[in-house]
Amino acid sequence: GAGVSQSPRYKVAKRGQDVALRCDPISGHVSLFWYQQALGQGPEFLTYFQNEAQLDKSGLPSDRFFAERPEGSVSTLKIQRTQQEDSAVYLCASSYRQVSNSPLHFGNGTRLTVT
Amino acid sequence: GESVGLHLPTLSVQEGDNSIINCAYSNSASDYFIWYKQESGKGPQFIIDIRSNMDKRQGQRVTVLLNKTVKHLSLQIAATQPGDSAVYFCAEKVQGAQKLVFGQGTRLTINP
């Protein structure tokens, strides 16, 4: 069956460029999360949606980071004026209901390299 | 493929042996715990979860133990196979919140 799909798989951006990362969650999944994973580290929470509502964006590192999920399915993470410290793997995850009732299913991520 | 973790704690076991991966969590208000397996170039893959009202849960070849007194979680993998080689992460969820907070991770290497 279809899992969480993320695109592009790899993205190279010059410092200062804007990027947009796409996530297609599992069909019917209510909850959607974005995580950032630096090399050698565990995933770090960025933001959480329940349907189209962004209920928690406490993990976004700066106002250059923006996420949306306008119709409650596909989500886009946008990073403006990219910096070298933004280089990481960006993971998207979805779950059918609340996290404690159904585990998060992750995509394979988008690896962003800022040069 | 790219490496998930270059400087993680490492556990090496012989193929066929049992392995135990440990995790200390920090928040006594956490009510849900989960183990993920991550292979190079892939996203974390769900293994097993446990709620705080339990102290043990078993799956296929895996067992999770939860000790709330000392805030310790462990993952036992029976009869390890080469395909078990990966980085393993524990994660916790605080009661009332939705996000998972991940630990550092442990690299498991299976020797033939």
Image: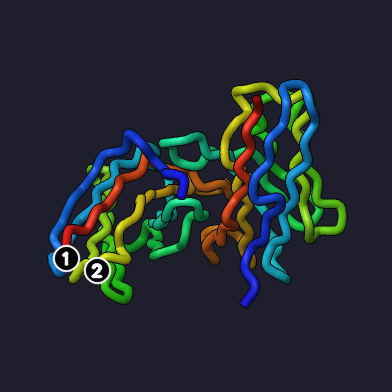
* Residue denoted by label 2: B81
Chain containing mark 1: B
Which of the numbered marks, if any, corresponds to residue A81? none
Q: Secondary structure at mark 1?
A: loop
Residue B15: give its label: 1
| Residue A20 x, y percent position in the rendering | 78, 41
B16 lies left or right of B60: left
Disc 1 crowd rating (10 Å Cα; few below 14, some 14-19, many 20+) is some
Q: Earlier in the sequence, mark 2 or mark 1?
A: 1
Q: How is the image coloured?
A: rainbow
At a point 68% along the width and 41% down the height, the residue shown is A11
The reply, left or right, for residue B17 in relation to residue B7 is left
Residue A42 location, x and y as percent? 45, 40
Q: Is residue B55 above or below residue B79?
A: above
Q: Nearer the viewer, residue A80 or A34?
A: A80
Q: Position of residue B104 (x, y in %)?
A: 37, 39
Q: Residue at x 30, y 58 (%)?
A: B85
Whether labels 2 and 1 share one chain: yes
Task: Work out how far the residue at label 2 is from the one at label 1, CA to CA, in angstroms.
Answer: 6 Å
> Toward which corner of the image does residue B4 lie, by quadrant?
top left
Amino acid of disc 2: Gln
Amino acid type, residue under disc 1 in the picture: Glu
Residue A19 at x, y percent in the picture = 77, 36
Residue occupying the point 71% across, 53% down: A7
Between A15 and B64, the residue placed more toward the observer is A15
- Badge count: 2
Residue at (21% x, 67% y) in the render: B80
Subunit ID for the residue under disc 2? B
Tell me, yes or no, whether the two marked residues, 2 and 1, touch with CB atoms within 8 Å.
Answer: yes
